[in-house]
Image (spheres, rainbow, N blue to C red):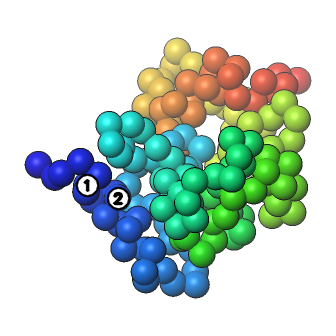
Amino acid sequence: MSKKGQGNGIKFLRALLTDAPADCVIWPQFRDPNGYGRLGHDGKGYWAHLLMCELAHGKPPTPEHEAAHSCGRGHDACVNPRHLSWATKTRNQLDRRAHGTAASAGWRWHPKLNPEKVLEIRALRGKKTQREIAAMFGVTDATVRDVQSGRSWKKLTAA
């Protein structure tokens, strides 16, 4: 058993502090349904990019600051400390818009889905399991659940 704070995830992040390449470094472990890396550290769950930003740049200057990606690939689980900095929510959202990764009002952004696929996923409800549907579309079970329940893609309805 590894010591607290010394698991493979935290070791991976700490190694990047001294040897980060110029290109994106994609988190190799668990990713949430939106693509962001997750890990456990000191008995709590963290987003990998947030923990990396704190390791590289210290605590956020204010509670309103977020870990922002200069590369625009946070949704692809980039954890390169050279690409992370603290930014206000407004600055981070403006950067997301500039990178083309901002969600439009009422729509949850997901790169693997489009309106046609969402309608197909909803039509398969009760005909296939969420796991089967997820495999068909290359998404997670949680994404299928959110689409079918209306939690994501809220404004999309069948014509």
Counting labels gives 2
Q: Please, what secondary structure does the residue beneath circle 1 have?
A: loop
Where residue 28 appears, as percent x and y from the top left, is 40, 61
- Residue 32 in view in this figure: yes
**Is the residue 18 above or below the residue 125 in the image?**
below
- What label sits on residue 10 in the rendered view? 2
The residue that label 1 is drawn on is 7
**Residue closer to the observer: 56 or 112:** 56
Mark 1 surroundings: few (<14), some (14-19) or many (≥20) residues within 10 A:
some
**Is the residue 55 above or below the residue 157 in the image?**
below
Drawn side of residue 114 relative to residue 82, left or right: right
Three-letter residue code for mark 1? Gly
Asked if the residue under mark 1 is in contact with the one under mark 2, i.e. CB atoms within 8 Å, the reply is: yes
**Is the residue 117 above or below the residue 156 in the image?**
below
Where residue 108 appears, as percent x and y from the top left, is 74, 36
- What label sits on residue 147 in the rendered view? none
Drawn side of residue 60 relative to residue 42, left or right: right
Where residue 135 appears, as percent x and y from the top left, is 46, 41
Drawn side of residue 44 relative to residue 115, left or right: left
The quadrant in which residue 11 appears is: bottom left
